[in-house]
Image (spheres, rainbow, N blue to C red):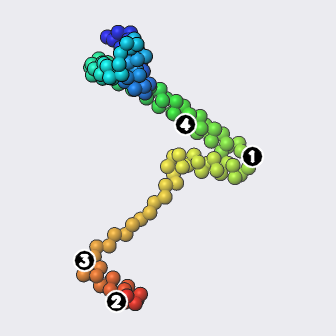
C-alpha cells in the first residue's frame, strides 16, 4: 500500500514526468537542493511497491490506449462498409471495397525470388563474359 504522496509520485511517473519533477509534485522540496531531490526521487523509485505501482499504472494506460485504437478502427471499418454499399459513385464504392480488402489482407503483393546455387568458378566465368561484353576484360 502506498502513501498518498507515493501514489502521486507514481501517477506522475506513469504519465511521463521525470523522477525529479514527480518528486517535486508529490513532496515539499522547497528547502532541498536539486541533487537531493534527484537522489530522493531515485531512492523512492527503487522501492519495489512504488515501481510495481508505476508499472501497473502504465499497463492500465496502455489498455485504455489499445481500447481507443480498437474503437477507432471499428468506426473506420463501419464507415468504409457503409460507403462500399451506399456511395453515390462507382469509384467511391470500389475505393471503399479496396480499403476493406487491404485491411483484411486480401491484396498482399507477393514477389517470388529464384535462388540460384552457383559455384565460385561459375560466378567468375559469368563475370568474365560480362566484362568482355563491356570491353573491360
Q: Can residue 22 be seen in this view?
A: yes
Position of 77 relative to 136 (above/below): above
Q: Which of 129 and 106 is in front in this view?
A: 129
Earlier in the chain: of badge 1 and badge 4, it is 4
Q: Residue 131 carries which label?
A: none
Residue 75 lies, with reference to residue 20, above or below; the image says below
Q: Classify 110 as above or below 21.
A: below
Distance from the alpha carbon under mark 2 to that under mark 3: 21 Å
Query: Which is more foreground, mark 1 or mark 3?
Result: 3
At 71% from the left and 44% from the top, the residue drawn is 87
SS at badge 1:
loop
N-term-proximal mark, 3 vs 4: 4
Residue 73, numbered circle:
4
For the residue pair 40 and 50, the one nearer the viewer reads as 40
Label 3 element class:
loop
Q: Is mark 4 on a helix, strand or loop?
A: helix
Amino acid at each position: 500500500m502506498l502513501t498518498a504522496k507515493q501514489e502521486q509520485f507514481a501517477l506522475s511517473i506513469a504519465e511521463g514526468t521525470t523522477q525529479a519533477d514527480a518528486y517535486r509534485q508529490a513532496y515539499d522540496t522547497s528547502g532541498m537542493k536539486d541533487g537531493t531531490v534527484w537522489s530522493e526521487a531515485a531512492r523512492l523509485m527503487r522501492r519495489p511497491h512504488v515501481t510495481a505501482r508505476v508499472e501497473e499504472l502504465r499497463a492500465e494506460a496502455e489498455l485504455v490506449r489499445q481500447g481507443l485504437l480498437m474503437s477507432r478502427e471499428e468506426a473506420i471499418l463501419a464507415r468504409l462498409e457503409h460507403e462500399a454499399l451506399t456511395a453515390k459513385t462507382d469509384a467511391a464504392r470500389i475505393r471503399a471495397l479496396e480499403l476493406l480488402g487491404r485491411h483484411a489482407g486480401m491484396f498482399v503483393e507477393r514477389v517470388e525470388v529464384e535462388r540460384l546455387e552457383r559455384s565460385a568458378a561459375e560466378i567468375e566465368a559469368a563475370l568474365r563474359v560480362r566484362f568482355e561484353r563491356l570491353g573491360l576484360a
